[in-house]
Amino acid sequence: MSDDLSTRLASLERLARRLEPDDHLREHLTRAASAYAEEFVTTLPSAPGFVPDEHDATARPEAVSENPRSIASFFQTLATSIDTVGINPASGRHLGYIPGGGVYASAWGDFLADITNRYAGVFYASPGAVRLENDLLAWLATVVGFPSTAVGNLTSGGSLASLIAIVTAREAAGLTCATIPTAVVYRSEHAHHCLDKALRIAGLNEVVLRELPLDDQYRVCPERTSALIAEDRAAGLRPWLLIGSAGTTDTGSIDPLDALATIAASEKLWYHVDGAYGAFFALTETGRSRLRGMERADSLVLDPHKTLFLPYGSGVVLVRDPTHLARAHRYQANYMQDADRASDVRSPAELSPELTKPFRGLRLWLPLWLHGVGAFRAALDEKLLLAQYAYRRLGEIGFERGPEPELSVVTYRWRPRTRHDGRPIDDETEIDAFNRRLHDSLLRDGRVFISSTLLRGRYTLRFAIVVHRTHRSDMDLALELLEAEVRRLEAARFSGCTESGHPLASGS
Ligand SMILES: *Cc1c(COP(=O)(O)O)cnc(C)c1O
């Protein structure tokens, strides 16, 4: 070897070796990261659920640079630019959208999966990781009542899981350019938008979309569904996919899953159940009975990063018939020939769009191992009861409420009173405006985070009680803040003050 080459190699090696921290740097990083995590977790109970983004551009993290920077400045930036602004999804006071919290142990599952970097896409590469993920999928199948022959995939979230389900349904029906415009999808206006998005991504923009009518509790009416299907058949269309919700995002309503399953079976439609929010409630007795019929789906989605309280990055798709999932995703390549050597264990790469993927199983397995399923079941039962509690208290305070919660979403709005006789007003636009102000006030206060939706076009506030850290005291705080703010805004209306006058006294 020439001297020149040796010198260059030595010099590059010295620089490249920076990528492998020595024991000293490893220890320093571990200690700093642990200390940061400790501080974050121990101060969570009093941390705000939401902080409006009022930072200016100088608070942005510094751009990446050619040279190393210090550990201390990294954690400083994390604390000031990222972890103290916006929604705090780890907080038990996050009652907006569909939260989840993020169980602590999952982080160590991720940490270990990243350190060992097991190749969980292919059985040949990591038989242990793939077996574990398959076992977890088998357990998930039992949770929702699927047969043990069902297969699935651990995805990054519900949207990706839904996309896999839609593509599988497309392939199972053998839809082609010629038949797509005659294929009909049946779903309610409250079906999650990720399903429409999945249809578009899957090249199915031209399918016929039928919106199923809802009852007064925002659940699909099965009778009307059958009638619509019959009309479509008579018109020469090809009913293809029926979507049911095991808990909608808007109101937590559960479609009549068993009745829809019967329709799908007799009409030979693919039956997809979206359980991204609701399906894990099947771990509870109450949930299991309310979700009856979900086990008859052809494909089903769950989101462990919602109702199993995992950190973001965990969705699940389950498909009843393994051949359909494999047909939609299996591929062969020359450079994969070693991996294809005889094994009858299924690999994630054969059953999903991903080839290389993180070993997601560990973030699910470690918390289940450490805490036991019983702790998750209890937390879910607690959320169901907290929703009942919140529903009752909102009624006592005087809120107009949506349907009694079937799961853990509660909807409500305030109907302001008239000045002269104290009766609730009728002007819907004014009611909307009042509730928007009420919502804005709560966001400015920030101690709890709630989100809103439109129900039958009207501005409606919601609680989605899903974070494992949400307990009775958090609900009480949310209810107290709402009540105090309603009284203040009502008083301001009568005195003619503007709404922005005196926001809630901040708790911090
Ligand atoms: C959150 C949600 C989804 C989408 O899942 P992501 O994990 O956010 O991608 C789908 N359906 C329902 C009912 C949801 O609540």
Image: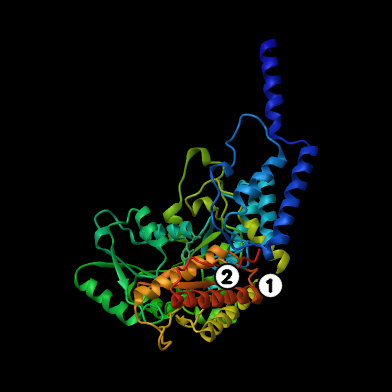
- Look at 71% across and 25% down and name the residue there: 14
User: Is residue 59 placed above or below 152 in the rendered structure?
Assistant: above
Give left or right: position of 288 versus 194: right
- Look at 46% across and 71% down and name the residue there: 497
**Percent x, y for residue 293?**
46, 78
Closer mark to the observer between disc 1 and disc 2: 2
Q: Amino acid at mark 2?
A: Val
- Work out which residue is located at the far left of the displayed protein and give it: 235
**Percent x, y for residue 141?**
55, 68
- Look at 61% across and 78% down and name the residue there: 381
For label 1, count other residues whose C-alpha is less than 10 Å away and answer few (under 14), some (14-19) or many (20+): some
**Pick the front one: 304 or 129:** 304
Instruction: Read off the residue under disc 2.
Output: 466
Which quadrant is home to the N terminus?
Answer: top right
Distance from Cα at disc 1 to Cα at disc 2: 14 Å
Give left or right: position of 109 versus 176: right
**Pick the front one: 194 or 327:** 194
The answer to whether residue 146 is visible is no
Secondary structure category for the residue under label 1: helix
**Pick the front one: 496 or 341:** 496
- Where residue 243 sits, quadrant-wise, is bottom left
Q: Amino acid at mark 1?
A: Ala
The answer to whether residue 85 is visible is yes
Which quadrant is home to the C terminus?
Answer: bottom right
Looking at the picture, the colour scheme in use is rainbow
**Percent x, y for residue 335?**
51, 38
Instruction: Read off the residue under disc 1.
Output: 375
First-in-chain label (1 vs 2): 1
Secondary structure category for the residue under label 2: loop
The label on residue 62 is none
